[in-house]
Image (cartoon, helix red, strand yellow):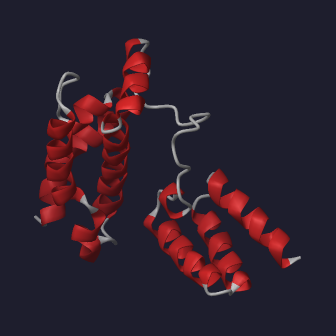
């Protein structure tokens, strides 16, 4: 049994139920825990689950599931480590909202293009496209973004970037 499979044996149930868990539950902390305690919990998780630690297994189907779980835990950490977001989240949690609603939250940076990708294939294509765009190859960037959209047709952030880049090329 590979290391990833061993991790999945423990993390599978967490992944399966993550849409029903609060950020506190995902990170294994209590609502009254300090920011320092939340940071420590997240760092332990990041040391185990960060995708860079498992890049050699990226073709393993378990890798993608662990990445999705890590991304949700990172989202939770970003909210719980920011006192303003945490206060808003706690208010929403009392009314049954388990995830922070970033829409309309002016004090939160927009998700970067590569962070908007759920699949590894799309993320790699977007990262390559971003590098091409930085180097002035807009046509190459557009091609990579369009291929990435093929993996994630519901990625609105990526679709908006393609539209914007297409306008620049006209």
Q: Is residue 101 left or right of residue 58?
A: right
Q: Is residue 43 left or right of residue 122?
A: left
Above or below 30: residue 143: below
Query: x, y percentage for residue 65?
Result: 33, 53
Q: Quadrant of the N terminus?
A: bottom left
Of all residues, the one furthest to the top in this rendering is 95
Above or below 52: residue 77: above
Q: Residue at x 51, y 64 (%)?
A: 114
Q: Quadrant of residue 87?
A: top left
Of all residues, the one furthest to the right in this rendering is 170
Judge by depth and name the residue closer to the eye, 65 or 84: 84
Q: Is residue 91 left or right of residue 122?
A: left
Query: x, y percentage for residue 123?
Result: 49, 67
Q: Residue at x 70, y 59 (%)?
A: 159
Query: x, y percentage for residue 98?
Result: 39, 26
Above or below 16: residue 116: below
Q: Quadrant of residue 150?
A: bottom right
Judge by depth and name the residue closer to the eye, 110 or 162: 110
Q: Is residue 66 left or right of residue 152?
A: left
Q: Quadrant of residue 50?
A: bottom left
Q: Quadrant of the C terminus?
A: bottom right
Judge by depth and name the residue closer to the eye, 155 or 37: 37
Query: x, y percentage for residue 38?
Result: 20, 38
Q: Residue at x 22, y 55 (%)?
A: 46
Above or below 85: residue 125: below
């Amino acid at each position: 049994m590979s290391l990833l499979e061993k991790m999945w044996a423990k993390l599978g149930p967490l992944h399966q139920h993550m849409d029903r868990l609060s950020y506190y539950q995902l990170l294994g902390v209590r609502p009254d825990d300090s920011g320092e305690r939340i940071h420590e919990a997240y760092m332990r998780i990041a040391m185990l689950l960060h995708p860079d630690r498992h890049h050699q297994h990226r073709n393993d189907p378990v890798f993608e599931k662990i990445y999705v779980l890590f991304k949700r835990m990172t989202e939770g950490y970003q909210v719980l480590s920011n006192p303003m977001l945490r206060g808003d989240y706690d208010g929403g949690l009392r009314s049954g909202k388990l995830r922070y609603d970033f829409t309309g939250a002016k004090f939160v940076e927009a998700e970067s293009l590569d962070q908007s990708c759920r699949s590894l294939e799309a993320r790699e294509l977007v990262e390559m496209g971003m590098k091409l765009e930085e180097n002035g190859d807009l046509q190459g960037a557009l091609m990579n973004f369009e291929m990435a959209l093929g993996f994630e047709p519901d990625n609105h952030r990526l679709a908006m970037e393609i539209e914007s880049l297409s306008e620049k090329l006209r």
